Image: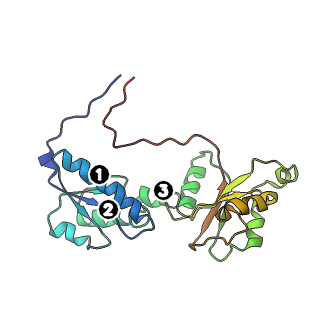
Amino acid sequence: MSFALPAIDVSSLGRVAVLMGGSSAEREISLMSGTGVLAALQSLGVNAQAFDPAQRDLGELKREGFDRVFIALHGRHGEDGTVQGALELLGIPYTGSGVMASAIAMDKTMTKRVWLASNLPTPRFVLLDADDQSRERVRAVPGDLGWRNRLRLGQRTISMRMPVSSQNGSRGIRLIARPDARRAVNSRAPACSMWTAAAPTGGVRVITSSTPGRRSRINSRRSKRPSS
């Protein structure tokens, strides 16, 4: 089975702003992906131009007559519903999810609550407020997750992930090893141990079981279309 994309008159797209850069911790990644998007659009004849919200006011999109926006921003103020809401108010169409979906998906705690409310399986988690991330509190997390018996048995498969609740991608994520592996973990990668300073960037943390599995990625730059 094969498929073909419908033909599009690129002139009908008008002026397209590629939002890239921004002010989040993932600015550099956004500049890289945005540059790739911009080059791809221009190679197809689209009247696309780069637009960095960290350097220009979003209101300029309207004033300069942009007809639509391709969002290549990463992290906060790019994927959390804020820029989507601004574009809604400006009346400019944009790519990706809308305001609510973006806001919920960016918040790991809220995402898990939505999944649980819909009876979708998700690893157990513990929410740590910004002022509740002492070493003693983090040490107690395995028990909160119901791992006391597994720890006593000395199983070697226990691991947790400790991301910032409202941050995207792998920024701020820590892999936390089992307690009696403390020295080995610290000697190899101090940033991966629960005994190092918690939440170096501040904010709420979500500690959840680390689920093993295969990680897949789709490279959008490939021009070859899948067929079967």
Name the residue rendered at 72%, 59% in the picture.
Answer: 185
Per the model, the C-alpha gap separating discs 2 and 3 is: 20 Å
Inspect this view and state whether residue 194 appears. yes
- SS at mark 2 in the image: loop
- SS at mark 3 in the image: helix
Front residue (pair 165, 88):
165
Q: Where is residue 111 in the image (x, y as percent from the top left)?
A: 54, 56
Categorize mark 2 by other alpha carbons within 10 Å: few (<14), some (14-19), many (20+). Answer: many
Q: Position of residue 200 (x, y in %)?
A: 60, 72
Q: Identify the amino acid type marked 2.
A: Met
Disc sitting over residue 37 in the figure: 1
Q: Which residue position holds label 2? A: 20
Disc sitting over residue 194 in the figure: none
- SS at mark 1 in the image: helix
In the rendered image, the residue lying farthest to the bottom is 131
Disc 1 to disc 2: CB gap under 8 Å: yes
The quarter of the rendered structure image containing the N terminus is top left
Nearer the N terminus, badge 2 or badge 3? 2
Categorize mark 3 by other alpha carbons within 10 Å: few (<14), some (14-19), many (20+). Answer: some
Q: Identify the amino acid type marked 1.
A: Val
Q: Is residue 60 left or right of residue 203?
A: left
In the rendered image, the residue lying farthest to the front is 187
Q: In this view, does 48 lie above or below 64?
A: above
* Front disc: 3 or 1: 1
Q: Is residue 52 left or right of residue 117?
A: left
Q: Which residue position holds label 3? A: 105
Q: Identify the amino acid type marked 3.
A: Ala
Where residue 199 sits, quadrant-wise, is: bottom right
Nearer the N terminus, badge 3 or badge 1? 1
* Front disc: 2 or 3: 2
